[in-house]
Image (tube, rainbow, N blue to C red):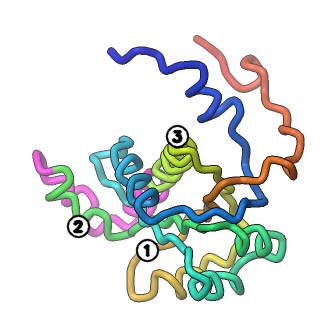
């Protein structure tokens, strides 16, 4: 059994963490992005299927490719972010199961079952996207996850020739706290949960 993490760690991951829309002009080194995914890959997925695929849009050239596919309200904050991660799901994830889940023939569960493939890929890539946000915060980064983009356009630009579909985008960097909105309200326990 692991010990409870500190209140300071909980504050960094959840209580004090915010979604950022403005960024300091400070680079996120490639080695930090590699470390981030080394953490993310350890989060659980069903049958270790690991369907999430990540593209880090960092260079000016890559940002220019992304910009026309963003909703108008997401352009400025994304173009000014040091990095925008595209989190997608690989609809051929099951081809990797003999390596990732070797103790049984899990690939056969999915062969020819497109509905199960799509549901499993979406659910587990979304989980990995949540791990991504928490791991980024743990490494001292701020995040700005968002929808509001042309999925087909992003897929054609960044996943052409692959059976990968975009799920959501997440800006990364060091946020400017001076322009944060007030934190939005949250439910009280009894408003969204019950213990039976």
Taking depth in this image into account, of 49 and 21 the one nearest to the observer is 21
Find disc 3 in the rendering and name its residue.
138
* Residue 82 is inside the magenta segment: no
The magenta region covers: 102-124
The image quadrant where one finds the N terminus is top left
Find disc 1 in the rendering and name its residue.
164
For label 1, the SS is strand
Foreground: disc 1 or disc 3: 3
Tell me the residue at 69%/29% (across/down): 15
Label 3 crowd bin: few (<14), some (14–19), many (20+), radius 10 Å: some
Measured in 3D between alpha carbons, the distance from the residue under mark 3 to the one under mark 2, in whole angstroms, is 31 Å
Find disc 2 in the rendering and name its residue.
95
Taking depth in this image into account, of 145 and 172 the one nearest to the observer is 172
| Residue 122 against residue 133 in the figure, above or below | below
Tell me the residue at 36%/46% (across/down): 45
Q: Position of residue 81 (x, y in %)?
A: 68, 67
Q: Predominant secondary structure in magenta?
A: helix
Tell me the residue at 10%/45% (across/down): 103
- Marks 3 & 2, CB-CB < 8 Å contact: no
For label 2, the SS is helix
Residue at the front extreme, as displayed: 26
State which tag comes first along the sequence, 3 or 2: 2
Measured in 3D between alpha carbons, the distance from the residue under mark 1 to the one under mark 2, in whole angstroms, is 13 Å
State which tag comes first along the sequence, 1 or 3: 3
| Residue 176 against residue 189 in the figure, above or below | below
Label 1 crowd bin: few (<14), some (14–19), many (20+), radius 10 Å: many
């Amino acid at each position: 059994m692991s010990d409870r993490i500190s209140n300071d760690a909980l504050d960094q991951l959840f209580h004090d963490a915010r979604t950022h829309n403005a960024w300091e002009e400070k680079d996120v080194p490639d080695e930090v992005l590699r470390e981030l995914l080394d953490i993310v890959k350890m989060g659980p997925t069903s049958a270790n299927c690991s369907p999430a695929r990540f593209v880090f849009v960092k260079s000016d050239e890559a940002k220019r490719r992304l910009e026309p596919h963003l909703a108008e309200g997401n352009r400025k904050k994304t173009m000014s972010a040091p990095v925008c991660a595209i989190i997608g799901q690989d609809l051929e994830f099951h081809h990797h199961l003999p390596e990732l889940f070797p103790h049984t023939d899990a690939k056969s569960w999915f062969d020819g079952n497109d509905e199960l493939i799509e549901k499993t890929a979406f659910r587990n890539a979304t989980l990995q996207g949540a791990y991504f946000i928490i791991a980024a915060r743990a490494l001292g980064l701020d995040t700005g996850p968002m929808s509001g983009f042309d999925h087909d356009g992003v897929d054609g630009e960044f996943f052409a020739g692959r059976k990968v579909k975009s799920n959501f985008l997440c800006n990364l960097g060091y946020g400017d706290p001076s322009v944060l909105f007030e934190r939005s309200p949250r439910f009280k326990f009894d408003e969204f949960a019950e213990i039976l």
